[in-house]
Image (spheres, rainbow, N blue to C red):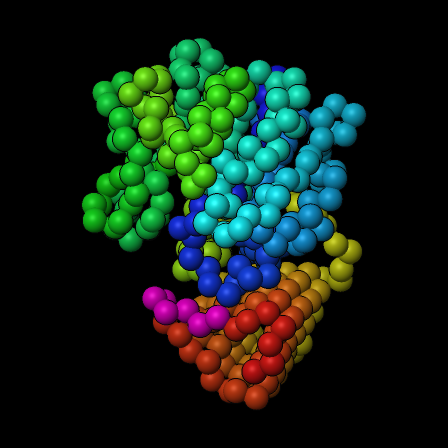
Amino acid sequence: MRNVLGIVAFASDSTQFGVMEKYRTVGSFSFLGRYRIVDFPISNMSNSGLSRIHVHVRKNPRSIINHLGGGRQYNINAKKGGLSIFFGEGKVSDIFNTDVASYYDNLNNIIEDKSEYVVISLGSVVSNINYQEVIDEHIASGNDITIVYKFSDEAKEKFINCLTLSLGKEKDVTKIDINHGIYKTRNISLETYVLSKKLFVELVKQARERSTLYWFKDIVNENLYRLNVKGFAYRGPVYIINSFKAYFDANLELIQRDKAKELFRKDWQIHTKTNDSVPAKYSKDARVSHSLISNGAIINGTVKNSVIGRGCIIEKDAVVENSVVLPGSYVGKNVHLNYVVVDKKAVIEKVKNIEGTDQEIVYIERGSKV
């Protein structure tokens, strides 16, 4: 699809990750022990035929630059397209570091691209959406902007602080709002937009003139009265990673085979950077149930309903349940973890019991010794 530019946007300032985001952008969070979150929108774009992709990073770009490289793992051919990474030029305050600011700082790169349309997708959305279907409907309908949404009847419990769309009879978008968990049913915006590159550039410039604090959603919302903006219903699986709890819940939900089969289709591969590593090793004392264990992990203890990342060691008589352990971490003998996220290369051996709840998950900081 040579006339479409893919733009992977960064999440808004409403995301709530605390210290976990200190070390990397949301898109480069380890996910399901094997992937990074950004793998999903980029793979979806590549699978949909987009060969030119811009990835915008709000802060802490080192991890995502190292992971993405030149994009070869996503089957992006540098001769026909390419993957580029952009980030803000350094703002006085983080409040000014909006997606619009990043687009504006890099506007020449967008204008010089020969594409006729742009597809914008959040780098923090896990899905398997086919953008070709959205683009085809957008062009056929003559819309100015098409916004992808997911209808949810669990909006009181899920998708908190995500954007919502109010729709008319013909799926025309009449209002963009925020899900505060008040109503059971909501049309959850995936913040995925299809529009002409010309209109996109106009809106970025207009937003910049209106306010240096504007996000792209703000300028779209402001122009609903004059533009033909329609919703596109996506019916597949979606996980919007906009909080620490959303990240934890998505990891544990996708341990379920039926949920995983919905997301990972044989005809729609999710690509990622691969590492040469040995298979996971299980000792005779290991007890593992309903869990995802990554390559290179050594399991000598008990693991239940958990995700264990690459190269992790779970020692004898340790119990890890309802937890997410990121790559390279060590859980010592007789340690019991329940509802815990252990960040990369942490060592837990002195404190024997760390227990949270499904509403209050405990976080162990990256590289810490506990």
Q: Position of residue 198 (x, y in %)?
A: 52, 17
Q: Position of residue 135 (x, y in %)?
A: 49, 20
Number of numbered discs visible in the structure rendering: 0
Tell whether position 362 is magenta.
yes
Q: Position of residue 199 (x, y in %)?
A: 48, 19
Which image quadrant: the N terminus?
A: top right
- Give me the residue at 69% from left, 45% from top: 68
- Give me the residue at 66% from left, 40% from top: 85
User: 162 or 100, which lies in front?
Assistant: 100
- Determine if residue 109 is in view: yes
Judge whether 16 appears above or below 80 on screen: below
In the rendered image, the residue lying farthest to the left is 183
User: 297 or 119, which lies in front?
Assistant: 119
Stretch of the chain drawn in magenta: 358-363
* Residue 18 left/right relative to 315: left
Q: Position of residue 299 (x, y in %)?
A: 63, 73
- Determine if residue 257 is in view: no
Judge whether 110 appears above or below 156 on screen: above
